[in-house]
Image: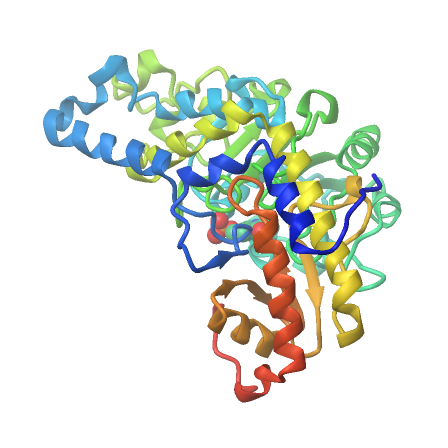
Amino acid sequence: MRYEFKDGLEFVRSLDKSDKLFNLRNRFYLKPDEIYMDGNSLGLSSKDAEKALLKAFDVWRKEAIKIWGAEDGYYFNLSKKIAEKLKSLINADAEEIVVLGSITTNIHQALTTFYKPTKEKYKIIVDELNFPTDIYAAKSIIELKGYNVGDVLVEVKSRDKRTIKEEDIISKMTDDVALILLPSVLYRSAQLLDMELITKEAHKRGIIIGWDLAHSMGSVPHDFKKINPDFAVWCSYKYLNAGPGATAGMYINKKHFNKSVGLKGWFGSKDESQFLMSHDFDQDKDANGWLQGTHNIFSMAPLDGALDIFNEVGISNIRQKSLHITAYLMYLIDNKLTKYGYIISNPREDHRRGGHVCLEHEEAYRISLALRDNNIIPDYREPNAIRLAPVALYVSYEEVYHLVDILEKIIISKEYEKYSLNKVTVL
Ligand SMILES: *Cc1c(COP(=O)(O)O)cnc(C)c1O
């Protein structure tokens, strides 16, 4: 889509004025003098998340063991309650969603369920730009099955080291491929893959396909009734704002409910048999069969609270602002920053990009440090990328404007030169 933008504070302020989501900022704990651009790594805390967490603690304090039965079994059924709030974000049925683990453990859970190699069909397709933990999980299952990683793992290469071409993925879908694991949005370049096309092509060839929604859940709506993937995983601490290490999620397509769960646990039992303490696993009839141990109530309660805002506003409105505010950021960068060696490396088309802008610069590392000292929190990724996420729920257009001014100032004043080139970890 083409947007009409102008430079200047007056125009920016008019954007904030007409932003229907603007007041939602008040529900988040923003620091008055800080601009937070790192919601793609760790979303901000909110009053909604805090309230739900404190409430769970209070119920524990008052009820002790009876917490499981309190409020009509709310906490015992917390995964189901949260699934009801998550379903509109991916257009799936609540029965297809469970809340457990982390992305890493949920990929293990999915792969142990779905990776059933045969002599003819045993390869796993991944992409060379995916996040390391996804690849480690894929390598684990290959080793657990007694194969050599080199014989089984097919890595789709990037032509430009930033993005992956859909056609390059499809061309790797040979008859010997059993399973595909890909990210919806690439964590570095923010490229949004054509999930519907890739899933369709996989299914044509009898290949199981799962998606990692780490960088799209809560930012990009998905229509799983249309895409029809076999499984998906995501975390809750990025765009879902549920807090560091908050319990993650998993989608199991209902056509697989009859599959035997890979990593079984007693919370995956049917409700009526869970407390019979039989050693025969009586798998629940839907995605709840994939649950494992006791719910992590204090890592799930903030998610329960944080999701309310998504259902009030609607994920399509969040996406609309996200596309608009990132487009505005790119407009300002094009106008003011490219002459200083800044390069926008995410795809430009709306249907091919997620919620952040990937800004490259040969001095990206030291610029990130200088941004921090200017009270702007960016996110740095090796070797030369600054990821900037103006999250729709809590970042204003004026903050984006200010960010670009600071990015310019840091170069003109050579402020970044005062920092050492020796890198320290985690930015
Ligand atoms: C953030 C992220 C992860 C993190 O995995 P955890 O198990 O939640 O620590 C994994 N994969 C991708 C693609 C990510 O962006």
Q: Considering the image in quadrants, where does the N terminus appear?
A: top right
- Is 54 on the left-hand or right-hand side of 7? left
Place of residue 319 in the rendered image (x, y in percent of width and height, measured from the top left)? 65, 35
**Which color mode does the image show?**
rainbow
Q: Is residue 262 left or right of residue 184?
A: left
- Examine the rendered structure and indicate whether residue 78 appears above or below residue 186: above
Locate residue 263: give its quadrant. top left
Question: Camera-side residue: 273 or 349?
Answer: 349
Q: Give 212 or 420, whichever is nearer the viewer.
A: 420
Residue 95 visible within the image? yes
Location of residue 75 by image quarter = top left
Q: Position of residue 364 (x, y in %)?
A: 64, 74
Tell me what residue is drawn at x 67 percent, y 46 percent: 325
- Residue shown at 74%/46% (left/top)? 353
Specify the farthest residue to the front. 10
Residue, x 62% and y 22% (percent of image)? 91
Asked if residue 420 lies left or right of residue 265, the reply is: right
Residue 309: image x %, image y %? 47, 29
Asked if residue 183 shows in the view, the reply is no
- Residues 275 and 64: in front is 64
Residue 221 location, x and y as percent? Answer: 65, 31
Q: Is residue 1 above or below residue 59?
A: below
Question: How many numbered callouts?
Answer: 0
